[in-house]
Image: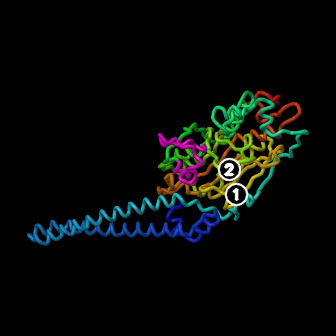
Amino acid sequence: MLTIKQITDNEEAVIRGLEKKHFAGAREAIGRVLSINDIRKTSQAELDSCLAEVKTLSRQIGALMKEGKTADAEAAKARVAEIKTKTKELEARMETAATDLQQLLYTIPNVPYDIVPEGAGAEDNVVVKTGGHDTVLPENALPHWELAKKYNLIDFDLGVKITGAGFPVYIGWGARLQRALINFFLDEARAAGYTEIMPPTVVNQASGFGTGQLPDKEGQMYHCELDDLYLIPTAEVPVTNIFRDVILDADQLPVKCCAYTECFRREAGSYGKDVRGLNRLHEFSKVELVRIDTPEHSAQSHQEMLDHVENLLVKLELPYRILRLCGGDISFTAALCYDFEVYSEAQKRWLEVSSVSNFDTYQANRLHCRYRTADKKTTLCHTLNGSALALPRIVAALLEDFQTPEGIRIPKALQPYMGTDMIR
């Protein structure tokens, strides 16, 4: 969440940033934050004054009793009792203000960086780079859901039988392709210096609030109501929460973690071509990168993560493009985000496969994730994450773009993991 200092030092800049994100009522929300903060500060000042007066009176009472000035001592005691009553009122007012302030700040998104373009939605995102080769498909090329059926790789109907739509069953070479991609992504991450984590795939409410999925995306998460636990939408949540309430030393940064998990998303409101086949699932596999860094180095970390994801797509021989998301399309918690998309020649559309984001101090403030500088001061870290990569649409693009009359070709980088160069 935003810090009070960030708001008080740059009120107008914060409001402009929130308006760039199309956050309704930005000025009113910030005005309310400042108003509640004034109540908290005023109450604190009054409380400090009361406590100082009690301390002075307590010393005076002893002296008055020694001097035999009983009436004056009793009057001082009565004043102390009066102040203590007021003190309780002030403490209650401060506690209410602090709670109200935190709950309000939870509902206010992060402020985007200046480099984030203006725009209302995906159509306003800026393509910053394209790469990969042009795909030439055979005549009568098939979309991935038909290829999956033809080669018995994925059974969507069986998934419906077992669970429901959006929960496919991978079979034979389809299951092996999933495992090959997971291992390939993890090996590449390890070679780049990331420590592999195997976290839980259910988290508590504090973890959801820590990374910003709650309260913003509560409706998109599967909630185990009896235990008040949530199925994770991404490994970002449990891995980043490892550093909740932690103070790191500067020489430990950047922290670089990666994790493979299953991810669960309700995807309420999805429909049409967006949900066909693997295009949008409720459960899917993903390898996630997470970094904890200093403010001075986080921009370099972000670029290194972008280079890493791009290199994966190059090795997979897929046509891709990189987009800088506009204010209206960037996530609630991100200050800067780039999306990677691969091109599906069979579907004639771009498929998002990764988002790589810098959250600045927004998540760290929620998490109380800090580091100790050389002069022993503590300050908030920057947090970053990115998919490297999400499997469903990568699988869709591989099946569609590498189909041949003889079968589905396997890119060279995956052949050692697959044990074959062709699915027939």
Label 1 crowd (10 A; few <14 / some 14-19 / many >=20): many
Q: Is residue 143 left or right of residue 324?
A: right
Vertical placement of residue 321 versus 2, above or below: above
The image quarter containing residue 109 is bottom right
Residue 147, percent across and down? 80, 35
What amino acid type should be assigned to the residue bearing mark 2? Ser
Q: Position of residue 208 (x, y in %)?
A: 53, 48
Residue drawn at (53%, 65%) of the image: 6
Locate the C terminus by quadrant. Answer: top right
* Residue linked to disc 2: 355
Could you tell me if residue 245 is visible in this image?
yes
Residue 51 counted in the magenta span: no
Residue range (magenta):
208-234
Q: Is residue 418 left or right of residue 336?
A: right
Asked whether 211 falls inside the magenta stretch, the response is: yes
Residue projecting furthest to the left: 68
Depth order, front residue of 112/35: 35
- Label 1 sits on a secondary structure element that is loop
| Residue for point 39% across, 70% down | 42
Secondary structure under badge 2? strand
Coordinates of residue 122 in the picture (x, y in percent): 72, 57
Do the CB atoms of the residues marked 1 and 2 lie less than 8 Å apart? yes
Earlier residue among tags 1 and 2: 1
- Mark drawn on residue 325: 1
Point 65% across, 48% down: residue: 386
Q: Which amino acid type corresponds to the residue marked 1 in the rendered image?
A: Leu
Residue at the right extreme of this rendering:
139
